[in-house]
Image (spheres, rainbow, N blue to C red):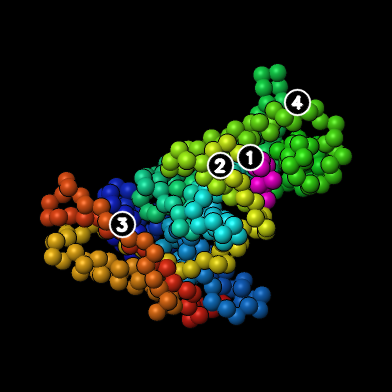
Amino acid sequence: MSLSHEIGRMGLLGRENATVVNAALRGLADRVATGLLRTVAEAGINAPVFLSQNDGTLMDVDYARRYPVATFASGPTNSMRGAAFLSRLPSCAVVDIGGTTSDVGILQHGFPREASTDVSVAGVQTNFRMPDVLSIGIGGGSHVVHQASGTTVGPASVGYRLGQEALVFGGTRLTATDIAVAGGRAEVGDASLVAHLDKSVVAAALRVVDDRLAEVVDRMRASAEPVPVVAVGGGSILVPEDLAGASRVVRPDHFAVANAIGAAIAQVGGEVDRVYSVVPQQRDTVLDEARQEAVDRAVAAGARPGSVEIVDIEEVPLAYLPGNATRIRVKAVGELSLGGPRA
């Protein structure tokens, strides 16, 4: 059974769809979880197994079996958490560039900002929690095409074949990585293989990359003030030292593996997002109830009892509903419990 009040947020249609998607994925989630546990055991690793959630926290395997939708978009989220850890910047914009796309999100107090509106998944309106991430088709393997009408970068990409097809690796396809090497932004492969590139083509392609990245960062920031930008992922060699709209660009040590680091340092989380009837004299009681439920959900997801703390509380009075209706959202995180399912 998948219960909508455990999965979705406010909004009947989005919550219903989210529950249907969750139910449809449970069979697949069970097979994936079983295979993961078996693979870890065959590797000789005797340790609890956890999976990433899309809010920057972890859940144990049994929780993932029940709520597979909680894994949606956990990849960019891990990179953002890793960026916060590596840069020591709890609030910033994160640009995570891989071989095919650039994912841009905002960190607030060390955790990714969550989307405030319903999220479309394969054209289906849902309302389970998702990070507020904007993606564009520019990555290290993006095709660079120069024509009389102008220069384009992406969205077509060589993807994982970058090491075989890019010019700097002896291939025949002009990619964004080749442009970065030719423009002096990176030292990858054999720079002599791109020394023949026309400087005007290189400059035009880099300008396209810079403008697109700056545009996305500008769309994601919440104020007109410049924000620090942390560049992570193997393709972040494309990010210039000076980016429009950024107060500074930080490319921390080990930036290429920020995703793995984000998963490794993550805590276990639990969240409550519900409408309560809040009588003025009982506000503290209602908040305590919501806090306790968030703590219980974190423990159910695999957090160690006693280590869980509340990291975010939000109250929004709903004037259009009777009975002093108030939307209360509480997020709790805690340390990993060593008693999780073992391989």
Q: CA distance from mark 3 to mark 2?
A: 29 Å
Find numbered disc 4 in the image and state the secondary structure of the residue it sits on.
helix
Mark 1: few/some/many CA within 10 Å (<14, 14-19, 20+): few
Which residue lies under the disc numbered 1? 242
Q: Are marks 4 and 1 in contact (CB under 8 Å)?
A: no
Disc assigned to residue 246: 2
**Rendered-image quadrant of the N terminus:** bottom left
Q: Earlier in the sequence, mark 2 or mark 4?
A: 4
Examine the image and state in which quarter residue 109 appears: bottom left
Q: Name the side, left or right, on which 207 lies relative to 269.
A: right
Segment tinted magenta in the rendering: 234-241
- Is 111 within the magenta? no
Q: Earlier in the sequence, mark 3 or mark 2?
A: 2
Q: Name the side, left or right, on which 17 lies relative to 90.
A: left
Residue 237 position, x and y percent, is: 69, 45
Q: Earlier in the sequence, mark 3 or mark 1?
A: 1
Mark 2: few/some/many CA within 10 Å (<14, 14-19, 20+): many
Which residue lies under the disc numbered 3? 314
Which residue lies under the disc numbered 4? 200
Q: How many marks?
A: 4
Q: Give the residue type that dot 4 points to.
A: Ser
Q: CA distance from mark 4 to mark 1?
A: 20 Å
Q: Give the residue type that dot 1 points to.
A: Asp
Find numbered disc 2 in the image and state the secondary structure of the residue it sits on.
strand
Q: Nearer the viewer, mark 2 or mark 4?
A: 2
Q: Name the side, left or right, on which 99 lies relative to 222.
A: right
Front-most of residues 158 and 292: 292
Q: Give the residue type that dot 3 points to.
A: Glu
Q: Give the residue type that dot 2 points to.
A: Ala
Q: Earlier in the sequence, mark 4 or mark 3?
A: 4
